Structures are given as structure tokens and as C-alpha cells.
Amino acid sequence: MQKNQAEEFLNLLGQAHNEIKAAIRANEKNTALDLLGQCQDGAMKLGEMIEKAEGEDFPTIHLLENYCELVYGIYEEVAGMSRYTGDGTVSEKGQGEKGTIIGGEQGHNANPGTTWNHLNESLKQIRNSVRNDIKIRKEAVFLPYKASMWDSLESVWEAAKADSDCDAYVIPIPYFDKKPDGSLGEMHYEGEQYPEYVPITKYDEFDFKGHHPDMIFIHNPYDMANAVTSIHPFFYSSNIKKFTDCLVYIPYYITTGGMSEGQSLCSAYVHADYIIIQSEKFRKFFDPIIPDKKFQALGSPKSDSVLKKCQNPPEAPESWKKKMEGKKVYFYNTSLGGILGNTEKFLKKMEYVFRCFRGREDVCLLWRPHPLMESTLDSMRAEYRPMYDSLKQQFIREDWGIFDDTPNIEDTIALSDVYIGDAGTSVTALFGIAGKPMFILNNNISEEPSEEDWRGEIITGFRRDGYDEWKITQGNKLYYSPDNDYRYEYYCDLSEYAGGEYYSSAIEINGKVYICPANAQDILVIEDRKIIKRIELERFLEVPGAFNLAWRIGEYLFLVPNRYPYIVRLDTRNDKVSYVMGSNEIFIREIDGEHRVGGSCTWNQYLMLASPVDSKVLAIHSESLETQVFTIKPGNSCGCATMIAVDKEIWFLPYVGRMVTRWDPETGEAREYSELPETIHMRDGAAGYCGENKESSLFSMAIPYKNNLILSPSLGNMFLMLNRDTGKCEEWKPPFEVSYEEKNGYFPFWSVGIFVRKTDVLGEWSYRYYDVQARKLYDVDLENGGYREIPIEFDKKELEEHAAGFDKTSQWMTYSCNEDAFHSLSDFLSGKTPGKLFSQELQREAYRTIVENNDGTCGEKIYRFAATEDAFP
């Protein structure tokens, strides 16, 4: 920048020389004198700047001194000149030979052209010296805020420091805790926590405007938008961009294959000139409004740091050595995402992990909480801070494990053997690159599995339309009941991934089995225990959650989206895919940060989709794909969680509240039922599944019984019987025992239970009911009050044979082993889990596909990119 300033100033001197020539020719002596004075002042300042950077004996300094003497001499001559005659002579005394001035050491010719030649000849010498003698030195400034996140910048700084033509400054910046109301709280500065070999410049001692660094590197993208912390407002990207021509954002994290939605658009992306991403695939995670030219897929400097440390592990702190000696060290990571998901369950999980390790002599637990854990709890979950503090203090007090609050996580990774903890954090990615095993914990699990707890993970539910011969289970495995009697056997694998819940259900149409996607973006056709066809859908998402569920209408399959942008129809006669565009906003909404998908059902030849926030309904004709939007009158704001077609009518069960609605699509008539028993409410412990809503998703299903409707509870505490004519509503007592309480973490909870379909097995009013908590299936006779349990059978040994072990988990969690009923934490510590064994080579190969330059060269390549002239906009 300084060399550019020098060259720009020399160009201005050239312009001034032209004006001096013109002023002398026009006898404007004062103008000429003023310009000469400005030339001399500017040359002196330029000399001071160059002397400061290059030293007083630098060649350009001497040329500038000569120039100043020349300007002074011309100034004296012009000051003593009466006027220029225009013919090369001057009047007044003191004149000698024609065209010269007596006086002054060099006897300069006062002819304007000659004066101009002298000035420009001197300027030419200065310009050549600036161009050839002054070597370009760049300035690179690094602005970390958390010392524990320095690894995201360190290898870039090392490359800048090693460049003899670059001055590199590390300037840790202060940050503030955020109070619950969003205002700034206590300020923190961690400049003293950096390694001794990193020279630190104080943030209030660096003149950003005066230096105007060639490049500035940042790793905080949020500016003021983080709910937990805020960097000092001076260092918001909008302000710091004023002081550089090249602002580079490098993420403070590295991922295992996915990214959270909260990272898709941040303040720094707008102001940064470049955004470093770890591979090309991650471009799709960012908001499309960000110009593609900003993205540079160069990897993550964090990979450089962890590889360097693992190749040359540091010496362990003295207080750690005895605890680690002769033991396998397990790094326990507790993340912010984990504790904010379900805080109470997360804390119980921590207790369980500590129990598993306490008293064992063969293993050592090293617990490293996220550095912002406590400030996050204070800001967003203050009521749980005492429980967390109690666990932390107990762990430290008992002193059987290692509590790690050191600033450099790579040192700890290098000293650890195995990772346990949450998925999808920067720490998992670092262990992946380092080639160390990762055991991903399920934060819902807080006890050892019993003999039958595998049922909670394998038996996940049944379809309302009765396609129960096929079941997709944990690990994307397809199971089949040959006699359609709920006795299942393994059929085939559906994916190269051992997790990720890629597919939701299987529907058989005309002898072909169609596998409908959940997180995948394709439809599979299965035959003879293998995939015979993969019907690719347009790919729009790089995050989970593409589709909600699937419906069959005749020869058509409809996929109801969750985050996918379109409704999808597959014509199974020719496997042609069609898309219904522009309608998602009717039945998919974001309300106060909650993602909602409204209820749906089939009615005649229509797919019906309801709004989760109001009384609108989208109707799609299965053949023509023509759409209509209805508004049910009288309207309400309860939204619809479940739609049920009963005879010619459609019933709506509310998303929020207790308003049940009945609608006749042919006549448009509607009736609302709100006089429910006062004793109905959300069951105890259900609040954690519905946010702040005190009455959310009370009901899961409604089935007709004579002139009544039986409502089964979802998050509610009772069954109801509603008279369709009178509106009278009272509690209905089921003949079987209902499980209202969550069993344990191996049984994922989403509802008390649901009536899945009519069966006529026990009579005219026979229905099949699925108890979600018990994972049991019943045929229920509404008329006579009888029931029978239908056994759901899997061969446990067969399930164990197909258990994954260590494998490619998903595109969002590249390679790991996941905790479940077959892979408990205690069994993992004892080496007793089934499935594939850990392979360091397979893990490293998997990570090479998602992190560019993960061979230790990332920082060098980022710096070289930023230091080239092409990097400057």
C-alpha cells in the first residue's frame, strides 16, 4: 500500500510540474511558488515514510534530498524574477546571459521549459528508484478473539511470518458476553493466553488507518448477531473493511460434512472479500445471495494445526501424567449444540458418561467443555447453570479424570486416543483428520441398555395406509415380512451410509417396491434383494430434512417436502418425476424459530395439505397437478398438525390449542369443536418437544366410530370421544394399557401413540393402534372393548450381524461408530461392540473428500492466495 501511495504521489508531482511550467509562462509567480512549496513538502513527507520503512541510507532518500535542493533553487529564482517576457529572457536587474538568472548555486535557467525538464529529470530518477529499489512488503493482520480458536488462523500466520516480504501482526481483539436482553456484558481480552512464540500487538496500540494492511484475516462471522457473545464493535466486519483492500473470513470451525443453518448467512460474509471454505461442496450450504467469486475452497487451517501436533505430541501437563499413564485416553466433548438441544437430557447424559468411567482402571476420561459453555448457559439456559456447575465441581473434586481448560485444543487431541461426544462439531472433524476413532454419543441415552431396548430403535412406526410388509430400520436397512405378519427378516441395504435416516418408507405398487426418501433426494426401486433403479430428483439441499412423508394415490407416489423446495410426484407407470412448485409456503412455515409442516391426507383423487398456522388448505389433483387453495370458514389460527379423511369430510387436528375442525370440501361447510374436557392437557414431561407452546399437538389421530370420533393423544394426556352431531366430548378409556411416560433414551419419543388404520380383524369397528412408547401394536374392537396384541418380531442376532460398527455414517458425519442399544458406551470401552472394526485408513480417506489440503499445506495456500495481486478486488 505504501509503495502504491509513493507511486501515486510521484504522479501528482508530475502533474504539479506541468502546472508550475504553465504558471511561470503566465507570469503567475505566486501560483508557481505555492506549487513549488507543496512539491517540496510532499517530497519531504515521502522521504520520511520511505526512511521509516527502509532506513536513512536508502538510495531513494538521497534522490529526494537532491530533488528538494532543486526545488529550493527554482523557488529562489522564481521569487527573484520580475516577469517572464515570453522570448526566453527576463526583465529587471540581476540578469546575465539571455535566459539565465544570476544567483543560486546551479545558475538555473528560468525558462519554463528548461525548469520543467530539470524537475522531471529528477522525478524520473526518483520514480525509477521507487520502482526498482523499493521491494514490496505486505502487511497481514490477524484478528482472533478466542485464544482457543487461534488454530483457525495460526498456519496462515505462520506462512505470512515466513515470508520475508511480509510483516505479520497478531492482534487479539476483545469480546463481550451478551446479557439475556442482548446488551453487552462483561468484556474479555485473551491476549495473554496465546503461545509464547506468537508476538502479540495490543488492539489499542495499532493504527489501522495509518497502516491500512494489505490483508486482514478474521474468524468471527457474527459481528453483533451472536446471542452469546459479541466482539468489540470497532472490529465488526463493516468497520474493519474500511482499513484494508482484502478482508478474508476463515471459519473458526471445521465440519464433518455438514453445516448448521445458522452459518448460511452471517454479517461478515457481506463485507469480506473472500470466504474460505473447506471444500467445493460447502458452497451449497451458504445463502445463494453471496457471490460465488467470494468463495475459495482451500480447506481449513485447523487441519494443519492438528496434524502438526499429532505428529509431534507435546508433553502432557504434570497434573495429567499419572492419570493417563498406561491408559487409553478418551476425549469427552460437550458442545453448545448438544446442551441447547435438550438441556435437561444433556446434563443427565453427562452424569451417565461420568458413571461409565468412574472407577475404571483401564481408561482415562478427559473432559473438555466448549469454551463458551458457561456464558451460553447464562445467556440462554440460566436455570440449568446450577446443575451444570454441580456436575463440573463434582468432577473436579473427585479428581479421577482430567478437566481440560487449556487454550490449545490440538495439544489435547494429540494426547488423546479416542473421541466421545456430540456429532458435527469442529472437534469431531479434527479427530477425523488425525485418524483417531470417534464414538458419537446419543444424548437421549443415560443408562445401560436392557435386553429388549433395541426394539426402541428398530421399530419406528407404521404407515396409515397399511403398507407394513416392508420396514426400513436403523442404518438404512430394509426388512421384509414375507407373510405380512410383522415377522421381519433382513432384505438388503439401501445406502452406502450406515446412518443419516436417508429413507422413510417402502410402498409396493404393481410388483415394484419403491423406497421413499427422508433425507435422501432420490427414490429407489427394489427387486430381488438389490436396488435395480435409482430415480434421481433435482438436488437442492446439502442439509438433512428433505421430505416429510409419502402418499400413494392410484399409480402415483407423492412426496410431501419438509425442506425440499417442491412437492414431488412419481408416475410409477413410467417412473416419470413431476414437480409442483410455488406452493410450499402454504403448508410449511417458520414460526418464532420453529419449523412447522402442516398435516396432509388423500381425499378422492386429491392430495390435501394444510397450513400449520392458519385455516388454508392446498388441494392438488393427482392426475392434472392442478392446484387450488381453500380458506376454511370460520378460520382459526390453531393450524393443522394432522388431517384425516372420514367419509366425505376432512377433519383437522390442531397444531396449537384444542380446536378440532370438520370440513366438507364439496360444500365448503365447516364446524369447529372446542368444548373439550377441562382435564385434558399436555402430558407431564412433554414440554421439551414443543417449545413454548403449552398446548401443542395434543392429538395424533382421529378415527370414526359410529357417529363419534375417537381422538388418540400425541402429546396430550388422554383419549377423547367426540360426538359429531352434538359436539359433546368426553374421555375415552382404551381397553389396553397406554404408555404415557417416556421409557428411556433408546425409545425415541414423538407421540403417545396413533391409530394407524381400520382392519375389521375383530369386527366392524376394529382398528389397529400403535403404542409409540412401548413399541407395541394392537387390534382394538371399539364396539365390544376387546383387543389383541400383534407380535412384532425381528431376529436380534440378525440385527447384530448387520449392525454398522465403524463405517461411513452419513454425508454430514463422515466416519464414526454411533452409540445405540447394540453399541453401548460401556461395551465400547471394553471393546465388545459388534460390526466393523475401526480403520484409520478408511477414516482418513473419507475426510480427504470433504477437506481440501488436509496434508498440512492449507495455511500456506490460503496466505499465498491472499498475497497475490489477483486477490485484491
Image: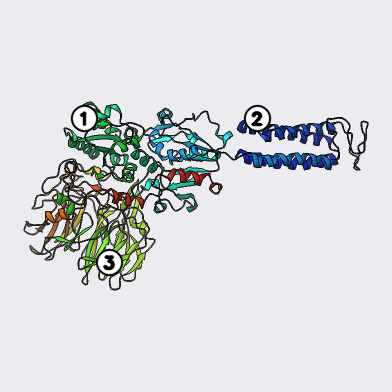
Tag 2 and tag 1, C-beta contact below 8 Å: no
Left or right, 646 with reference to 40: left
Which is more foreground, mark 3 or mark 1? Answer: 1
Q: Earlier in the sequence, mark 3 or mark 1?
A: 1
Q: CA distance from mark 3 to mark 1?
A: 57 Å
Left or right, 871 with reference to 338: right
Q: Position of residue 574 (x, y in %)?
A: 30, 73
Quadrant of the snapshot with the N terminus = top right
Q: Earlier in the sequence, mark 3 or mark 2?
A: 2
Which is more foreground, mark 3 or mark 2? Answer: 2
Q: Are there few (<14), some (14-19), or many (20+) residues within 10 Å of tag 3? A: many
Q: Quadrant of residue 477?
A: bottom left
Residue furthest to the bottom: 573
> At label 2, which amino acid type do we have?
Glu
> At label 3, which amino acid type do we have?
Leu
Left or right, 801 with reference to 112: left
Which is more foreground, mark 2 or mark 1? Answer: 2
Q: Which residue is mark 2?
A: 56
Residue 603 visible in rendering: no
Q: Which residue is mark 3?
A: 557
Left or right, 209 with reference to 626: right
Q: Which is nearer the eye, 391 or 212?
A: 212
